[in-house]
Image (spheres, rainbow, N blue to C red):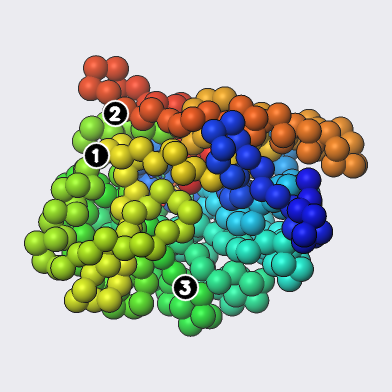
Amino acid sequence: MFDSAATTKPLPMIDPFGRSIDYLRVSVTDRCDFRCVYCMSENMAFLPKKDLLTLEELDRLCSAFIAKGVRKLRLTGGEPLVRKDVMTLFRSLSRHLDRGALDELTVTTNGSQLARHAADLAACGVRRINVSLDTLDPAKFRAVTRWGDLDAVLRGIDAALAAGIHVKINAVALRGVNEAEIEGLVAWAHGKGMDISFIEVMPLGDIEPSRLEQYLPLSLVRARLAERWTLSESEHRTGGPARYVEVAETGGRIGFITPMTHNFCESCNRVRITCTGTLYMCLGQDDAADLRAPLRASEADDLLSDAIDRAIARKPRGHDFVIDRRTRQPAVSRHMSMTGG
Ligand code: SAM
Ligand code: SF4
């Protein structure tokens, strides 16, 4: 559907609760070179490569959403930058930025491959990225990621900053792991001109350690930060679930993403696609729509477009995450790396 005033600008898709859906997150691979303890088990079984959409199919799928009003696209995973030739996808998607159909092309990455891709990302029009980093202690970093090398990530962050990309750090708040380091992380990030957001552990996918052991409510984190710094509520919004405060002493921002203690579903503007072309309308619900079949059934996009409309028409009101002491079951069995965080 097109706006009559601006013939090239499609109207956003509207879900049953009146929310505009203009943000698509695409998991381009379920694979990763890390095994973060809250995200994956050590022995993850990954999808056979033949089940993955090709880069051309991912481009077609993203382009179909852009034609339906999506204005912001985030590539994620798994680790998006480990997918072979992924820069080809960034390069081809950047045409939507050039022609003004897309406001933002971005990526969430663990930073391990960033040093070699940062300049190319900037050349593709990527202006802001999220890098996940939970600790600045090399031994803890190795323990949390199981396989990661902190130095490589820090080099990647510096390369991104040098390429003129704005970096936001995402850190999962982990009880007994980075709890004592929260202020240090904020001081480091703000010192480099980066915003930082903290995330509560979400009950996604079966992993070995108990979520109860990992879970650290952000209300505690915030209270602790407020003892050291002057925090004031910020009007800053990115259309996402983070709520921001400004730190008077550093001039930087801290975001809090609190799926467990505060529900943010009323303003949800996003849907997610897996690397096999399954569309999830909510991170915390199981209902999904297969877009691979309509994508492959025809070279024209009519079937695909209809399937997207039918899926958006059943986007649920929200999730109901609980870390349950009795059942100890995850709220959904999918790992975050599958749906794309
Ligand atoms: N590999 C990339 C990365 O780590 O940034 C992108 C994918 S990762 C699944 C996206 C984000 O999800 C990361 O910031 C990670 O910390 C977060 N994440 C993964 N599992 C989570 C969980 N169970 N609860 C909260 N955040 C989680
Ligand atoms: Fe990999 Fe990201 Fe999951 Fe860590 S959080 S295991 S880096 S997908």
Mark 2: give few (<14), some (14-19) or many (20+) Cα within 10 Å. Answer: some
Find disc 3 in the rendering and name its residue.
Answer: 166
Image spot of residue 51 (x, y percent): 70, 36
Front position in the image: 18 or 34: 18
Front position in the image: 309 or 37: 309
Residue 139, label in figure: none
CB under 8 Å between callouts 2 and 1?
Answer: yes
Image spot of residue 16 (x, y percent): 59, 31
Mark 3: give few (<14), some (14-19) or many (20+) Cα within 10 Å. Answer: some
Front position in the image: 230 or 14: 14
Find disc 2 in the rendering and name its residue.
Answer: 323
To which quarter of the image does residue 133 belong? Answer: bottom left
Find disc 1 in the rendering and name its residue.
Answer: 215
Report the amino acid beneath label 2: Ile
Image spot of residue 250 (x, y percent): 24, 76
Front position in the image: 4 or 81: 4
| Residue at x 43%, y 30% (from the top left corner) | 319
Image height of 167 relative to 298, above or below: below
